[in-house]
Each structure stands twice: as C-alpha cells, then as structure tokens.
Image (cartoon, grey):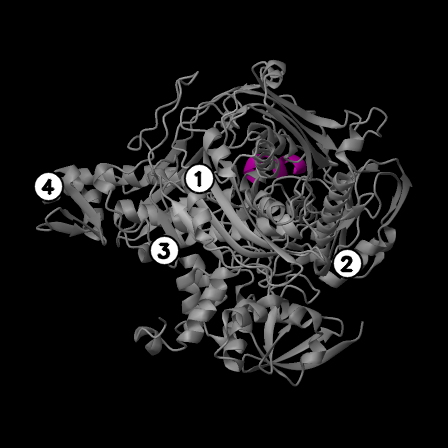
Amino acid sequence: MIRTQLTLSVNNREHEVWVRNDRTLLDVLHDDLGMPDVRYGCAEGVCGTCTVLLDGQPVSACTMYAVQAEGHEIVTLRGWSDPREDPHPLQKRFLERGASQCGFCTAGVLLTAATLAQRNPKATRDEIRHELVGNLCRCTGYQAIVDAVEDYLRAPTEQAAERGEAQ
Amino acid sequence: MTTVQPGTTPDTTEPPQAPTEFDPDADSGPLERERNFRVVGQSPAHHDFVNKVRGTLLYAADWNLPGMIHGKVVRSDVGPAKIVRIDTSAAERLEGVVAVLTAADVPHNAIVEHASGGLGELTVEQPVLARDRVRYVGEPVAVVAAVDPETAAEAADLVDIDYEPLPGVYSAEDALAGDAPLVHDEGNVLVNWRLERGDLDAAFAKAAVVVENTYRTQHVEHAYMETEAGVGWLENDVVTLRVSTQVIEHAVEIAAILGLPQNQVRVIASYMGGGFGGKEDMTVEPYLALLVWRTRRPVRMIWSRQESILASTKRHPFVMHYRTAADEDGRILAVDADIIGDAGAYPCLSARVLFAAAALSTGPYRVPVLRTRSRAVFTNNVPTSAFRGFGAMQVVFAYESQIDAVATALGLDREEVRDRNYIAKGDLTAAGEPLTTAVAIAETRRAALESLGAPAEPSGPNKVVGRGFAGSMQPYGRTIWFRDHASAWVTLQPDGTLLIRSGVTDLGAGQAASLCQIASEILGVPLSDISVYIGDTALNPPAGGTFATRQLYMSGNAILRAARKLRDQLSTVAAKELGVPEDALVWADGMVRSENGDTGMSLPELVRAASEARVDTSVLTTWRARSGGFDPQKGQGNTFPDYTFGTHAAEVEVDLETGDVAVLKYAACHDVGRAINPIRVQGQIIGGAAQGIGYALMEDCVTDEGHPLSSLFADYLVPSSMDLPDIQVAVVESGEGRGPLNARGIGEPPIGPPAATIASAVEAAIGVRPKQLPITAERVLALLDERDRRQSTKEQQ
C-alpha cells in the first residue's frame, strides 16, 4: 500500500503524519494522533459517533481517507471546547439535562448540535430532531439531548440563562 | 417527570405462605435520622457525565501501549460444517504478522456455562476456537495478531479453512422435531423449565372464556454504540485485560482457558459505551488473553461493527403459545403457557433467560392455576443470551395481549379486567412465592394513561388513530438461589475526602455515580470530594457483574452498609470529642456536628482524632441478598428478590395505505420505590422505552439459513431521533423496594411494556391484534387484509 506524508490541521495545530493511503481519517485522529474524543462506531458513515468538523461542517471521519483531509481545518470535540477551560454553555445544558448516558455518541452529537445552533439558532424541536438524525444514540432515546439543545438555543449564553430567558 | 403519590395497597386474600414482612427500616431502608435527604433525590452532574460531555473519558479502545499489536478473530463464513483442514501458512508468512492461533493453541479450549445453577440444563461446551466442527456463521475458528489492524485483517483473510457442510436447523420449532439435525450430540433442548400449580383441566373446564394465541418475537441486536473492544498486556506475569465488559468476574474463566491460577489473570472494566446485556458474556476477552499469553506483547482487539452484527449474541426469538381461562367477570382462572426460545448454537445464558420467561410468564396477575413450560432450544443460528429484559420482557408481549383478548372476548373494559386481576403484596407469583413489597401497578397505569392527554385526530383520510397500554413486572437482582452478594470499601482520607472502591462495572447508567450519592448522603462528604474506583478484579472488592438490574440493589446496599458502618465507628470518636450523643450527630457538608449546630468538627479533624483513638477510617463490607431454593421437579420455589412494576401507554396512527405505524404519543410510568437520582431514573425509563419501541416496530436481525441478510449497520434499523416522540415520564415512589433506601431497580423494567403497548394501540386503531414482532408496515398490511377477508366472509354469511 502506498504511503503519503500529510500535514493535517487539527484543532488549530499542524500535524505531520505518514500514512497508508487507505487509512481513514478516524484511525489517524484516534490512533496516530491520540485523540480519543473521535471514536469508532460503524465505519459506514451511519451512526455519527466519529463526527468531526471539517471546515466547520460535521462529517464522519470513518468514511474519509486521511489523505482527503489535507488542506482542510479539522476540529474535534476537544478542539471545539478545550477540557482545560470552562465547559461550553451547550455542554452545560447537556450536563443539566442528563443528555449523556454511556457517552459514546456524545462528542458527535455535540458537534452536530453546535453547527445547527450556528446555522439555525431558532430551530424548533422538530428541526433539532431532524438535524440529529445522523447521530445514533442507543441509551437516551434522544429526548434529553433534544431538551439540552433546545435549552441552549433559547438561551445561548450563560447571562441569558441566568436572566431566566430560558423560560 | 412527574411524581405520583401511590394509593393504599389493596387488601390481600390469605396468602398460602407467610410472606417475609417488608420492613422499610430494616436493612435497606432509611433510618429515622436519615429521612431528610440532602443528596439522594437530587440529580447532580457526576464525574462520569462531565468526562463524557468533555470528551475526556477513556473507553476500551482508547488505550495504547508501547509495542502494542492488533488482534483479529477469524470467523467461519459457513453454517454447520466439519472443519476438514485449516492452513495458516500464508497468514503466517505475511510481513507484520506476529501470531496465528487455532484450537490446538488453546490450553483449555472450553467455555462451560452453568447458567441454570445446576438445575437440569445440558452440559455443553463452547470452544474458544472451533476444533473440528462449526455450528453457526461467524463462529471463531482462529485468531491472528499483527503490527497494525490492516495487516491483521489481511492475515485473517489468508487463513484458509476447508469445510464440509453438515445439515442445519434454523428455528427452535424445527429443532424440536424428532428428525431434526442435532446441533450438539447431547440434544437440542438445552433446558426445559416447568412451573405448575393446581388442576389445570378443572380450571379450564369451568371457564366462561378461553383465549388461545401464539406470539412470535425476533432476533434483536444490542447495538451499543461502542463495539466489543479491549487491550491486554502482561504485567508482573499477570495477564491483564482492560475491556468493555459488564462482568470482570470472567477473570476466573479466562484463567481456566489459559490453564493459569486465578491470581494470574486480572480484568479491568472500562466505562462501557453501552452494554444492554451484550457484554455480559465474554466478548474479546479469551482472544485477547490467548494472544497476550502467547506473544507476551500488549494486544488490542476491536470488533468491527459488521463483525459485531454478524457474531455478537442477540436477544432470543420466542414462540409463545398461551391459553388463558377466565370467568364471566374476567377473573383469570388459569394460564397454560408453552414458551420456546431460540438459544442459537451454544448455551451462553439461555437457561437463565428461559427461566426468567417462565417465572414471569403470567405477568403482574394473580393466577391461581397454571402450567408453564419454557424451553431453550439449540439451533444453528448465532447464539442468543442476555439482553435488557432477559426473557421477562418477551413474555410481556404475550401476557398483556392475552389479557386484552380476555377483555375483548367478554366485552369488558381492558382497565377493569386488569383491576380485577392485578397481583398484590402477599399474592403468589407464578413460581409460588409471595410478593413482599407494595404493588402500585394500578397507579402507574392511571398516570401513564393520564399523561397521554386528549386523543388526537387522524392526520389524513386514510389514517386511523388508536390508543393502547400495557404493564409489566420485571425482576431486579439475580435469581435467588445464586446467593448473591456484593462488597464495597470506603476509606476516609486524612483531608476528609472519600475513596470508594467497588468491583462494579459501569454501563453508562450511573452505576458508579449512584454509589457516590449514597455514600455522600450517609457520611456528609460532598460529592466533589468523593472518588470512585471501579471494575478491577485486582484492586476492588467483588461486586458481581452489572446485569439483572442488580447493581443499585446489590452494590447500592453494600455501599449503604459500608458507609453506615464507617459512620457508626467514627461516631464513637466524634461523640466523645464533641460531647454529643452518637445518634444525635449530624453528618453534612464535610462536617460532623450537633443537631443545633453549636458544636462540630471537620472531617479532617475527625480523621486525626480517630487515628489518635486507634479507630479505623476505612470499612470493607459485604452485603448479602436473601437466598432461597427452587425445586425444578415441583416447579415451585424462590426465584427473584423483588420486582419493579410499570405501565406504558401510547397513541399510534396507522396509515391504511402503507401499513406504516407512527407513534404519536408515548407515556411511561414505573414504581421505582425511591428515586435516588431522578434524572438518571428518567433517562433509564425513556431510553428503555425507546429501545422497546424499536423492538416493537423496526428492529430485526433477518437471516437466511443462519446467514444474516446484511451485517451493515445501515441495514439494522435502531430508532433515530426522528422515529421517537417525546416520552412523558411519571414515577411512583411507593417507598417499598429492596434496594438501598427502599429504591427498586429501573435499568431493565422500561423495555418490557412497549411492544405490547404498541400492539394494543394498533389493535385499537385497526381492529386486529398484531401477534408477531416487529410490527412492520408489511405485517400491518397483512393484518388489514386478514381483517377485510374476515369482514367479507361475514357479509357473505
């Protein structure tokens, strides 16, 4: 198998990698770059577990080869919200609502929800459900996730939440 | 989520056996001074939530060691067959391959499961790697390891196996036929459970109505988002596996396979990305252990999703034939049930699953006379085993449908018939054991139905709307004759922080977090000052696995006992230091103080005083569940420690042109005894209902002679965010449960009622009862055809 030297931009940092051309972006992020917040779910692009942002858009890292990602900006959950800093308000709503059970799908769900919030800050409950259709969750039945995203959309900043605008 | 106050428990007629009195203050109940809960009943965001939401939790696959190689199982691509020849030479020659192992390389090539606890099942061995014969598509035949996953996959493809096909059998009904091919030489019936009470013929003879039906359910995939995975290595000559498992106690079986003493195998459970019973049997463990032991290198193994769909255990398909006799008022006189479950090619936990089916075969009803036969039958299908609900959920579809059928036959109201038949405290279960805690199922039904609100109008001309409900009774805790026990260890640190050590494994339902919450309640240590170390056979006291909705019940009681013991032994010190009676001390906010707050000391001060007084600041203790026996000949005896009751209600819309069923509204209510963490309780109820709705309407592992028609996740439909309505949740807190502080288990119960609930709603909409799952559009159209044929026959007459 042919190998290629790549420069991948992940979470605002450049990474040099030397990979087989058939190596998926998922395997490179998870195994080669040590990013456990990008997880294997199905390798079919069906479940959304391995969701990352590619130039701001959610994509499944399992159905992309790493070589295809060169020249694009990749953001993972830990790039979107650095664990050393305060949680993002959307993450706080997830905590309040218990929107994570086993947590395996949570990174993908958060990234998908975050892009929805940017694109359609007035999304209805149905639109939230529609947006999340590509992120399977086997534990929560989605309801707490939809609740958390809805809470966030109604009051996207902490100040708004404190002012009681969530009601 | 709303909380409903339970009504009074109905009076019971004289029980044939004196029930163990339920005393809320004995053992698991709150003591008088603990009644004003501060932490229990709250829903704090625990450590596990935070790590998951931040993306910092390390699951089984997120472990990397120097020199780590990658393992892959080579699986049979044919059904039943003789193995004529295995040629591993091409695989061994491939550059980067480190090991290719076959049956000859396994020291003790057998997994023997005594799931019935020695009550009459066949003893059938499951090889770790098939020797001379394979019995199902996907059976492991060899295992390889290589420097990277791609090379391992290539090597697996290069293992050349010649098979000679054998005749196979692919349904439990076919496998019972006299001339059916034998899946195992020992026979096709793994176990045959019988429960009997009273004179069946006499009861049926005096019945005003007898309803008789056959119900069929399907193979179901657990479909946890995290596939089976783990990493193993050798550390001080100990084979150490860090895997996604519900049961670290498999360490002893792994030792047996390797021929090692039990102190040379250590299993660590990572927080699981879902399990639902599918990680209760071993998955990657024996293969990882073999590779680690043979190569002496760290090894990682992750099953691909397609491999998981092909070869992981499934939920048992059941065929349930029921005859129910009732008098003219709808009172049940007798039930005659014959249940067969497709065990697949190996025993796994089938004997116990079919026992639960038998024990719960009559559901939450008082049934004076009964005969239940429940058989686990071998086939050449993929093995079936534990799955949330564990045999007690398949039967809900049958027993609730039968109650509705009785009501329909007598022209009675479905609720009324239930009110006349609900089991109550003191009544006997199917196995002849008196119930010992409150039964608030009628309250759960009222709450669920009320939550649906006003009925909806059909959204179009060819659409009809119907409403239904169903209740269930699900055990929590292990089968009682296993003499279950769990240990917990609590240690107060010099700075007042607390360590909890427990062998519990965490499925994502908060098994670890709930221990913190209970310990915090008793000892007054703030949650932020508690660390919990779980799931390690080397460093934690054993808790038993996380299954059978047993961990809140077992480890919850163990931690409650440990925390109380620690509090009691430190109370002597604090009482002396503060000059306050021991039972008047208040433990809260990291302090011990008098009730009026006049005097007190911090926990670090208390630890210092204890050290000077030579009092231990650590307690390791074991909690034992009550035990009992079951007589398989008489078919009566002790079964489960207790049960959780609940009712779900739904409104569906059926499209008469397409057969499509849309769930418009859904409500679920369970009596949880006491909600330790309301958000987690609600999460279990909604999540269980969602999985149950998938089971009712869409999920099915379709096979053709044992070959899956697809092993793609794209083809196995689990509910997406678009397939589910918002689920209204209500809980009843009866204050009677055998868990800590009177809680009842809630992990499995919510998956029981959905299929029967939706079948009941579909019948209300179209007038025909679905008796086979899943209730797909095609099946609904067939039911509509049946209805139309029946109507036209009637018109012709």
| Residue B519 visible in this rendered orientation of the protein | yes
Please state which of the two labelled residues, at mark 4 or mark 1, is closer to the viewer: 4
Amino acid under disc 1? Pro
Q: Is residue B365 left or right of residue B300?
A: left
Please state which of the two labelled residues, at mark 2 or mark 3, is closer to the viewer: 3
Identify the residue shown where x is 61% and y is 23%. B118
Judged from the image, the secondary structure of the residue bearing numbered disc 1 is loop
Could you tell me residue B672's position as x and y percent? 41, 42
**Cβ atoms at labels 4 and 1 below 8 Å apart:** no
Could you tell me residue B179's position as x and y percent? 86, 26
Label 4 crowd (10 A; few <14 / some 14-19 / many >=20): some
Amino acid under disc 2? Ala
Task: Pick whichever, B472 or B376, lies toward us.
Answer: B472
Residue A3: name its quadrant.
Answer: bottom right
Mark nearer the N terminus (3 vs 4): 3
Q: Is residue A89 rendered magenta in the image?
A: no
Q: Residue at label 2?
A: B153
Please state which of the two labelled residues, at mark 3 or mark 4, is closer to the viewer: 3
Mark nearer the N terminus (2 vs 3): 3
- What's the magenta region? B252-264
Q: Which mark is residue B43?
A: 3
Q: CA distance from mark 3 to mark 4?
A: 32 Å
Q: Residue at label 4?
A: B580
> Is the same chain shared between marks 4 and 2?
yes
**Cβ atoms at labels 2 and 3 below 8 Å apart:** no
Mark nearer the N terminus (4 vs 1): 1
> Main SS of the magenta segment?
helix
Q: Which mark is residue B541?
A: 1
Judged from the image, the secondary structure of the residue bearing numbered disc 3 is loop
The disc numbered 2 marks a residue on which chain? B
Q: CA distance from mark 4 to mark 1?
A: 34 Å
